[in-house]
Amino acid sequence: MFFPMMVLWSCCLAYFFGFFGISFVDTKVLSESPSTYGLQQLSPQDEEDEEEEEAEATPAAAATQNPAYVAPSVNMSATQQFVPGAGFKAPAATHQPRADGPICSDKKPAAAGTVAASAASSEEVDYTTLADEAVMEHLISGTLKDYQLEKKLGDYERAVSLRRNLYEHVLEKDLSSIPHMGYDYNKVFGANCEIVIGYVPIPLGIVGPLIINGEPVYIPMATTEGCLVASTNRGCKAISVAGGCYSVVMKDAITRAPCVRMPSAMRAAAVKRWVGHPDNYLLLEQAFNSTTNYGKLASVEATVAGRNVYLRFNCMSGDAMGMNMVSKGCLKAIDVLQAEFPDLVLIAISGNMCTDKKPAAINWIMGRGKSIVVEAIIPESIVTSVLRSSVAAMIETNTQKNHIGSAMAGAVGGFNAHAANIVTAVYLATGQDPAQNVESSNCITIMEYAEDKKSLHVSVTMPSIEVGTVGGGTHLPAQAGCLEICGVRGAAKGPGSMPGDNARKLAQIVGSAVLAGELSLMAALAANQLVNSHMALNRKPAEVTTASATEVNASGMRKNMSMPELNHTTTTAK
């Protein structure tokens, strides 16, 4: 009887201690488990050293107040070795923070008196009279912050050069491969980029002419992806020889959706009802429109989630992309709401129902920016001669890939072959915000037989293209030059023009270029030409001996067959 009781009592004790975290597991066996990879770097000697250090570091106060106090075991050994991973090497020494403060702060991690003295000293120095070596000494010591160089020197190119020297010193790397001379940094400072150390040249190609609504247009594309420009140019040729494409803007309104919070869900619902009343909407519209000459409020949609209300403002923004414009108008409209609802709290000017630079079904369904559709009819003969494919194969491939394949992937707005490729290339060339390719690339490509049951009818529908021809990067010289190529530089002017005409035309150019790119890539996929094309155009060619000038003559130059030969007959063919 005694023995069974002892066994039962032992089991109870084991359960009790295990419940409160006392381990009976052999740590040596555990360390050999695959689930502990990365932890086995701690050697037995390291463990012994840790135990000694922990015993010495036990807080005396804790021991006095609680004699039963046991210091927790934490692996903080200085000799612990980590396995290098993800391209990073184990640090050779502890990183020392810079003497100055955060980039956007004038505070320094030092005593208040020291900060005041340093600030006063910095203000007294006339850096324009100092040699570069002396300015560098101030930068390295932290008495001059690198982000202040443009303001302190007044010479933007010199500021960039000195900043490069500083970071070459900090990084211990040569930055000579990054160009910086000969750029107009006066246009960049305070507008497009901070802490500038140079610029990154991107190859710029051009495609066209692409006939859009009867007008021939050339389109610049900045990219490092080989074959993209050539492929899009082939699509332009097929469309233009077939008579061109037709495009229309169905909706034009940039959006911003502030998030406001009420004390209760009932109060949130009251805000939604108030916003939906026509008389109250007029108050919001009047406040919104008072902040800009070009921005015009088109609608406001309120969505309730518990105590939160998301107000999606839709705004006409002229030739600007419009994010700053709509944000400023939203703040003024929120003032009207707060006067009516004193318990309303603005959580964020952007509540992510806009939705900006993130995949979202609301952009795909409701649209954002410019909503367009572009179509073209490509005769069977052109599909065969220019695209080197067949109408039936392209229709079948488009259905299986762009529609069924994308549906199986759970795509939102991704029912296309590579719309993002063309959108991003044109955005980089024309000074748009490249991050907005996320929603601007929403596209469904449809291919089907035309009415004659022989030709290919192809269309792209893009509900959320976000572009502008003023503001942002559109004023930079190269980007402005690319807009000039498209014929949409700056704000729309001239007789009969309306605010926003240039931006709407640019959106149609982007969509038409996407149509060309989709047409060419789908033809290549249908004919299984993709890999061969990329191997020919997306690989660096082997070095060959350059022919002398006397060996090159006009008769020996190959004609560029990718350029369409447009005449009255070919441009009117259907």
Image: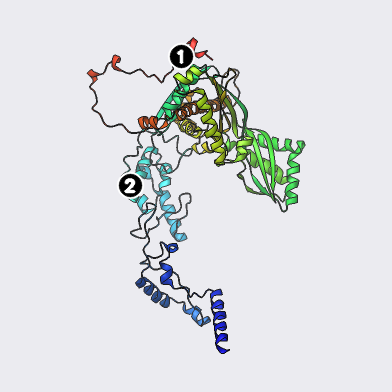
The answer to whether residue 320 of the structure is visible from this angle is no
| x and y percentages locating residue 66 in the rendered image | 53, 81
Q: Which residue is mark 1?
A: 566
Instruction: Indicate the quadrant where residue 455 lies.
Output: top right
Q: Amino acid at mark 1?
A: Leu
- The image's mark for residue 168 is 2
**172 above or below 28?**
above
**549 above or below 124?**
above
- Secondary element type, mark 1: loop
Instruction: Indicate the quadrant where residue 281 lies.
Output: top right
Q: What crowding class fits label 1: few (fewer than 14 Cα within 10 Å), some (14-19), or many (20 or more)? A: some
Image quadrant occupied by the C terminus? top right
N-terminal-most mark, 1 or 2: 2
Q: Amino acid at mark 2?
A: Glu
- Secondary element type, mark 2: helix
**Front-most of residues 527 and 50:** 527
The answer to whether residue 272 of the structure is visible from this angle is yes
Q: How is the image coloured?
A: rainbow
